[in-house]
Structures are given as structure tokens and as C-alpha cells.
Image (cartoon, grey):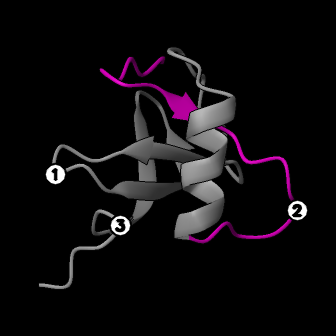
Amino acid sequence: MKLYPHHGFSKPTREGVPDAEACYRALQSRPTYSIEPKAGQTFCAYTSEGGVARLEIEHEEYKEVVVRVTAWKPVGETS
């Protein structure tokens, strides 16, 4: 399975779980438009509201992928 986002995905370079700032930097510097998700991988993506999100691939089952998503509001937005 491949995912094709409108504005791209990025895989952070640092070890560990990226925060909003790390995802934003990764998307700005290393976007890609096709990924093949595997269990244990983490990717970053833009949200439709202009923020960023972290996608943690938890596991794969046949043609399904279970993903944990953490999304952050756009920079400067408080509500």
C-alpha cells in the first residue's frame, strides 16, 4: 500500500518521536509524495487546516494499516 498526500509526507531524521516543530522542519526540508508504511515507522504530514501531524504506523493487517495520529494546530493559532 502507498499513500499519496496532497502536500507530501516526510520521515524525520532524528531518533525518537518527533514533536510539531520537528515535523514542520522535516516537511519543509525533505518532502516525499509516496510512502510504503511499515509497522514501527513514523511520518509527518500537513493537515487540511494548515497544521502538521505525526503518523505512527502501529501495525499492518492484510490490506489495512493501523495508524496513531497526533495533529497540531497551525503555528500561532490558539483556539
Viewed as shown, does residue 36 lie left or right of 9? Answer: right
Q: CA distance from mark 2 to mark 3?
A: 23 Å
Main SS category, magenta section: loop
Which circle, 2 or 3, is nearer the viewer?
Answer: 3
Compute the Cα span from label 1 to label 2: 27 Å
Residue 42, given in percent of the width and then of the height, sits at: 65, 51
Which one is in front in this view, the residue at disc 3 or the one at disc 1? 3
Residue 1: image location, x then y, percent: 48, 18
Whether the magenta-drawn stretch holds residue 14 is answered as yes
Q: Which mark is residue 75?
A: 3
How far from the left and from the top, in percent, is residue 45? Answer: 44, 42
**Closest to the observer: 39 or 16?**
16
As shown in the figure, which amino acid type bears the numbered disc 1? Glu
Q: Residue at x 31, y 56 (%)?
A: 51
Q: Residue furthest bottom?
A: 78
The magenta region covers 1-19
Q: Position of residue 66 (x, y in %)?
A: 43, 52
Identify the mark nearer the N-term, 3 or 1.
Answer: 1
Residue on which disc 1 sits: 49
